[in-house]
Amino acid sequence: MLKGLLKIFLGDKSSSDLKEIQPVVDEILKAGEALLSISADELRAKSTNLRDRINDHISDLQGEIDGLKLKSASMPESDLDAKEAVFNQIDTLEEKINEELEVILDELLPEAFAVMKETAKRFSAEEDIEVTALEYDKDIAATRDMVTIQGDKAYWKKTWDAAGSDVAWNMVHYDVQLVGGVALHRGSVAEMHTGEGKTLVATLPVFLNALTGRGVHLVTVNDYLARRDSEWMGPIYEFHG
């Protein structure tokens, strides 16, 4: 069964690709063991730490870009050639940032996937997850009943509305879905059939790449599924801000 599902993710090279991906899955599982005993606040702090490490990795390049943008803004509008030269420099630096983001995301993948899996596990196991109330908890609580605020604490329920129907979170990523998440992050795209877990698989690379703060596009087949799945999976991301 595992090889059959892997073929869906990876194509006919599934056996050789699994040998390459399995060590990454082992790292994810090892990282997950370290999360079992931490508090919900500490779990959320992990995502903040991951964001900070990503930003630190590209901070020098981003600083150069910011400086060039200031330089361009101070140039006369008539100095088109000079402005174009600056924008070309910015484009080159943006390409370097993308390359460096690929490096740091690959490095942080095991930790990020482990955080997402542990988050799914806690939503599945607990009726309410108690955390210190942050501003985004309060913002969500003001518009949706899935989060309530009591004093300085926020409580996240395991049940929420998705496209007009209440759903109770009851999913945790299996190892084969971790494999699928790694494959998707690496750019492998293949068909999966209904019921084989593609929606849950997608939470892993989406979360990882969203940590850059540069946005993630997830495409599905129609507007209804786009809305339903965004509302179904959304709280797992929103829990981390």
Image: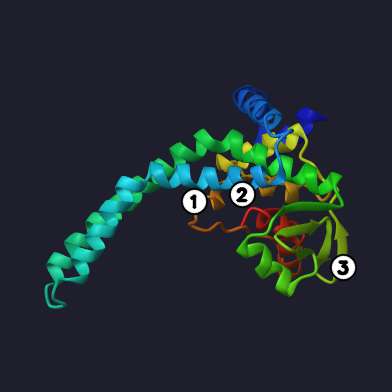
| Residue at the disc numbered 2 | 207
The image quadrant that residue 223 belongs to is: bottom right
- The N terminus lies in which quarter of the figure? top right
Q: Percent position (x, y) of residue 83?
A: 18, 67
Label 3 crowd bin: few (<14), some (14–19), many (20+), radius 10 Å: few
| Residue at the disc numbered 3 | 165
Label 1 crowd bin: few (<14), some (14–19), many (20+), radius 10 Å: some
Q: Earlier in the sequence, mark 2 or mark 1?
A: 2
The residue lying toward the viewer, choosing from 199 and 145, is 145
Which kind of residue does numbered mark 1 sit on? Thr
Which kind of residue does numbered mark 3 sit on? Ser
The image quadrant that residue 221 belongs to is: bottom right
Label 2 crowd bin: few (<14), some (14–19), many (20+), radius 10 Å: many
The residue lying toward the viewer, choosing from 78 and 214, is 214
Query: Vertical placement of 72 versus 213: above or below?
Result: below
Q: Percent position (x, y) of residue 99?
A: 39, 42
Q: CA distance from mark 2 to mark 3?
A: 24 Å
Q: Secondary structure at mark 2?
A: helix
Image disc number at residue 212: 1
Task: Name the residue furthest bottom.
Answer: 78
Which kind of residue does numbered mark 2 sit on? Phe
Task: Name the residue furthest front.
Answer: 151
The number of discs equals 3
Query: Vertical placement of 208 versus 150: above or below?
Result: above
